[in-house]
Image (spheres, rainbow, N blue to C red):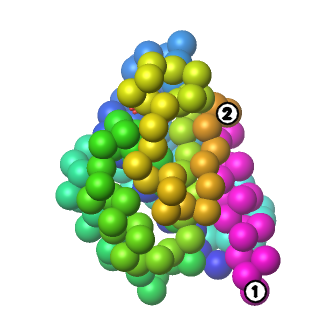
Amino acid sequence: MKIRIINGPNLNLLGTREPGVYGTQDLESVMKAAVEHGRKAGVEVDWIQHNEEGAIVTAIQQSKGVVDGLVLNPAAYTHTSVAIRDALQAVGIPCVEVHLSNIHAREGFRQTSLTAGVCVGQISGFGAASYRLGIDALIGQMKNRG
Ligand code: DQA
């Protein structure tokens, strides 16, 4: 089983970006822990990060037939992107949306996700562990399907 983690804009700044909200670990170390978590569960995990909406759309399209599941943190595009939602719906790859922060406990504009409705579900508020929980959720989903 292969899982791809897709990270949206500004997540390349993890560690220095609002550490009180997003933690002090940089993206590389958060992803390293997620890849290792997958490996222990017998799953191959790779990851990417893009600041551009179109690059995320392309990455979702190119994941079809290549990976079995997606863990997606669309970051700010969560709240704005019909294009990312449409791409997820078009490819039909099971996807778990994750957020480091609890978007439902934050500003009103963050409390709506345009993408969660086409995902298996959403995990929000567990910091770096949100990615690991996302991987576990996808594995559980695959087992239920299989
Ligand atoms: C985020 C939450 C978003 O509202 C925000 O724009 C981000 C990060 C999170 O992981 O908590 O960039 O997706």
Nearest the eye: 21 or 47: 21
| Alpha carbon separation for disc pair 2 and 1 | 28 Å
| Residue appearing at x 58%, y 22% in the figure | 105
| Amino acid type of the residue tagged 2 in the rendering | Phe
Q: Which residue is mark 1?
A: 146
Whether residue 66 appears in magenta in the rendering, the answer is: no
- Residue 126 badge: 2
Say few, some or many: other residues with alpha carbon within 10 Å of mark 1 (under 14 / 14 to 19 / 20 or more). few
Q: Is residue 132 above or below residue 61?
A: above
- Magenta extent: 129-146
Across and down, in percent, residue 38 comes to: 69, 61
Residue 71 visible in rendering: no
User: Quadrant of residue 58 in the image?
Assistant: bottom left
Helix, strand or loop at mark 2: loop
Q: Quadrant of the C terminus?
A: bottom right
Taking the image as shown, residue 123 lies to the left or right of residue 112, namely right
Across and down, in percent, residue 40 comes to: 77, 62
Nearest the eye: 58 or 34: 58
Helix, strand or loop at mark 1: loop
